[in-house]
Amino acid sequence: MRLKVLKRREGHIEIAVGGEGHTLLNLLQSSLLRDEAVRMAGYAKPHPLMDYSILFVEMKGDKTPEQAIIDAAERAKGELREFLSAFKGELERIKGDGNNED
């Protein structure tokens, strides 16, 4: 992953994110949009052949966009851990039942 800040002003940031696709950026965008201090969060892929996307974050409060991104990544990380734990539990349940059809 490569990151480069393209634009930065009070309450706004644009970051080029190289080597990542829709999977990570969509997860990060969804997590950012759950933050009440975020006015707008999105990303764009300038061209399908380009190996980077641009993440946009606009804030409506005193929180910095950098802090909002950090918080969103931590929130997504927690949700993925929760999913992994539930998934492993379900796999163990299926193995224990000897039945994988429900």
Image (tube, rainbow, N blue to C red):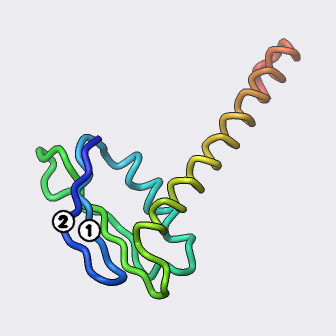
What is the number of the mark on residue 86? none
Q: Is residue 90 above or below residue 73?
A: above
Q: Where residue 96 appears, x then y in whole percent?
A: 87, 15
Instruction: Give me the residue at 30% from left, 43% from top.
Output: 20
Q: Earlier in the sequence, mark 2 or mark 1?
A: 2
Q: Where residue 62 appears, x then y in whole percent?
A: 48, 85
Q: Quadrant of residue 15?
A: bottom left
Measure the alpha-carbon separation of dots 2 and 1: 5 Å
10 Å crowding of disc 2: few (<14), some (14-19), many (20+): few
Instruction: Give me the residue at 73% from left, 34% from top.
Output: 85
Instruction: Give me the residue at 77% from left, 29% from top.
Output: 90
Which residue in the protein does label 1 denote? Answer: 14
26 left or right of 17? Answer: right
Q: Is residue 92 above or below residue 48?
A: above
Label 1 is placed on what type of residue? Glu
Which residue in the protein does label 2 denote? Answer: 6
Q: Badges 2 and 1: C-beta atoms under 8 Å apart?
A: yes
Which residue is nearer to you in this view: 88 or 10?
Answer: 10
Q: Where residue 6 appears, x then y in whole percent?
A: 18, 65
